[in-house]
Image (cartoon, grey):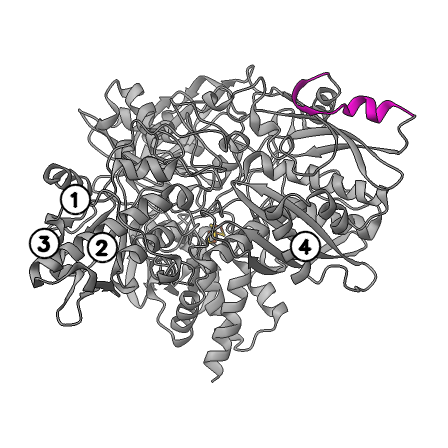
Amino acid sequence: MIKLKVNDKSVEYNGDPNQPLLWYLRDDLKLTGTKYGCGIGACGACTVHMNGSPVRSCSLPMAALGSSSIRTIEGLSSNVGKEVQQTWKELDVVQCGYCQSGQIMSATALLESNPKPSSTDIDNAMQGNICRCATYQRIRQAIGQTAKKLEG
Amino acid sequence: MYHLLQHHQQATASSADNTKTEITALSTTRRGFIKTISAGSGVFMLGCGVAPSLSQAAAAATPDLSSLVFNAFLKITPDNRVIVSIKHLDKGQGVTTGLTTIVADELGASWQQMDWEFAPADAKRYNNLYWGQSQGTGGSTSIANSWDQLRNTGASAREMFIQAATKKWQVEVGNITVKDGIVSDGKHSATLGELAAEAAKQSVPKEPKLKKTADLQLIGKDIPRKDSPEKVNGSAIYTQDIHLPGMLTALVLFPPKLRGKLISVDDKEAKKMPGVVDVVKIPRGVAVVAENFWTAKKARDTLQAKWDLSASESRGTDQLKQALTNATKQKNHVITTRGDAATTIAKDDIKGQVIEAEYHLPYMAHAAMEPMNCVVQVTDNGAEYWFGSQAPTIDQSQTAEILGISPDKVIIHTHYAGGSFGRRACPDDYVLDALHIAKNIKGRPVKMVWTREDDMQNCRFRPMSAHAIKAKVSTSGELLAWQHNAAAQPILRGTPFGGMIQGPVDPTVYEGISDLAYDFENFEVRATEFESPISTLWWRSVGHSSNAFVVETFVDQLARAAKVDPLSFRRKMLSKEPRWLGVLNLAAEKANWGKKLPKGTAQGIAVHKAMGSWVAQVAEVTVSGKDIRVNHVTCAIDCGIVINPDIVKAQMEGSIGFALGAIFGEEITLKEGHVEQKNFDSYTPLRMNQMPEVDVYMVDSTERPSGVGEPGVPPLTPAVANAVFAITGKPVTQLPIKLV
Ligand code: FES
Ligand code: FES
């Protein structure tokens, strides 16, 4: 049995240890904010936080989770996370929106570990998140503005 | 009025809170439609069943109005919410905000009280006015076709509120205003919700008076998107996210090549797996139906199938390229001709320089972020769908045909689509796959999902194409003649959209070429449809996405031959085309065209018209070794009246990023007919580090609104390629650009 925390709630898992975390979140827990985009770790749509670090849940089998703490877009509650979401709304970053949970989770993790990211830092941290609607310019701006807000 | 009201309530009961009494203010007279709609033109048109036309023919076409019926777009709840029915699919383009804005402004509502819901599938009320009797989203027509309809909706309702207030307060009509959601005569005032019941009892004005441009409060302003909050906190529901009681998940094993036919399948293993409900054969493959995704996926992996691939493509990309090139060498159908291009080019006594070029463009995948999927339940009397339906009327009629029922027994609940770029408007495809599965699973809804690999390998691609062009430039630097021969697979032929083909060749092969705006004397365009079992489909901006690249990079080759600056060369030939010139000059001015740049960096410019709108872009590009970096793109668009400038900007930014992938390596290639790309490791959309800075400018206009979702795509690849040409001196004639 696998015991873990999802959005601060304790849960127990008895199913197939090979099932990726993504499908456990989406199908079992009905936390559908985390999206499926590629299943091979190449698009970032499924990004969640595992013990505070961004991970691709599509490529993470349940067996690899140990007793970790998972945070999804639905449970994003940190200051940084809230501020990221707020700026996202202020700049109307979203288009189709399908990639945006992943973008927000990656951006939040970036700002939590690096409050003043340079343009290259942003490129590096966000390169794994594809946005087919190409909202990149606004994502970049939103990360920059959030960093400023958090500073002041 | 009463029965219409009932009808509307019924139709929206599933999505509205039906414990509340809804009062429907109906709008718009038939006469109003006729008057205003016949004024609309110049937009990509689609249709099914009625004579439709594509962009180049659109100006001449008059939509079929005889069957337009009274539509219901607006309801106001007693708790003061104003809800607009959105007849189009949101796939990121912002329609839920844009369409809602139009109603709100004419009505005089406050933005805070505005709300929206997707309209049900019902072509009688919610048809795309450019598509005849068909509901659907495409060709960048959502705002354009709805403009008059929704202004009339808002204005009619406003007048009904004013009527209601005059009666209630016993005052003169002229003293009453409706502003920020408040109806007032100075002494009395009421909210829209408070007056809604009375307003709904008033007669619908025959010809509501629209607001003067100066009185518009919301149109033209940066109104925040209505869909941002739920797309930012993960609560927005896409097809992929739908969970219904008893719902099953299905994955399909498709043949390794498109059009493969199943010979046999061994499903013993799969059927034994716990959680697998059934394995069913459908026309295009074998479906595993299970309790959830992971089970379905594991079971699908165990299927052993044999396929007959004799009807599939067996050529590789190089062979197709060669065959396409050969096709451009034939005496193909003449699409358009003026003067005598052949003689002008051939005759030595007409002095000048002859320039020749061959162009090649690859297959492209839509690769919407949300792979194709569809939820459907087949019942005894019909079918019920939940998905991002882009062409509900076609989906309804194809479903009805398969089930042997009437189309009104097919209910569609529309949900957000995680992108489309044309992919979701696709007959005989993912919707029917899902239906064929659900037919076998009675009593439970089925969610069919494609993996990314299914989506890419089973894709309908933007056609591969080839072009052969010859032109002559006079010794004084003028374009004398242009001879163009284009070959590409058709998109419309053999589909329910086939009725849109009016000449011998599918217009998607030559759109954006035959209607070249440049003023010169001798012009000939020939074209042919190339055949392959690979399926094709419209890819954001359709034929324009390829053809603008060809035309606009060739113009730069001509300008170079003429020894004229590419901007001046274009300007001179567009002197009688104010809207072309408008965007060209605006982009050039804002980009500071011709500014001094370091060695290895240059600007490139391109201009194109698609979906009724004009867009010019200037790209600033740096080449170092084999690397291309696009630093900056300046974009100017003329799309008529702008509803929401910030959304127009977003669409231009997005179009630029979308198109840029085609420069850097996005392409579908074939090996012995097998699609070589499977996922985002080999098919490579643009990523963050490749995104240039983008500035967007809009031409001030009082013309009707025209397309925004697509026209930003076509000029991007030629603008970038022209900058690369300026740096390297070598013309770019293929995409993606591979520098050696
Ligand atoms: S779905 Fe996990 S990275 Fe794409
Ligand atoms: S907003 Fe559509 S994929 Fe990013």
Q: Secondary structure at mark 3?
A: helix
Are dots 4 and 3 on a single chain? yes
Q: Quadrant of the N terminus of chain B?
A: top left
Residue at image point 77% right, 46% down: B569
Number of the label disc, if any, that sits on residue B618: 4
Q: Secondary structure at mark 1?
A: loop
Residue A18 location (% of width, % of height): 41, 48
Q: Secondary structure at mark 4?
A: strand
Number of the label disc, if any, that sits on residue B198: 3
Front-lying residue, A14 or B122:
B122
Q: How many labels, in total?
A: 4
Marks 4/1: CA distance?
49 Å
Marks 4/2: CA distance?
44 Å
Are dots 2 and 3 on a single chain? yes
Is the residue B136 above or below the residue B584 in the image?
A: above
User: First in sequence: mark 4 or mark 2?
Assistant: 2
User: First in sequence: mark 4 or mark 3?
Assistant: 3
Q: Is residue B386 visible?
A: no
Marks 4/3: CA distance?
55 Å
Identify the residue under disc 1: B13
Comparing marks 4 and 2, which lies closer to the viewer?
2
Q: Which span is picked out in magenta? A: B331-348
Residue at image point 80% right, 44% down: B559
Q: Chain of mark 1?
A: B
Marks 2/3: CA distance?
12 Å
> Answer yes or no: do the residues labelled 2 and 1 have beta carbons within 8 Å?
no
Marks 3/1: CA distance?
22 Å
Front-lying residue, B350 or B342:
B350
Amino acid type for the residue under numbered disc 2: Arg
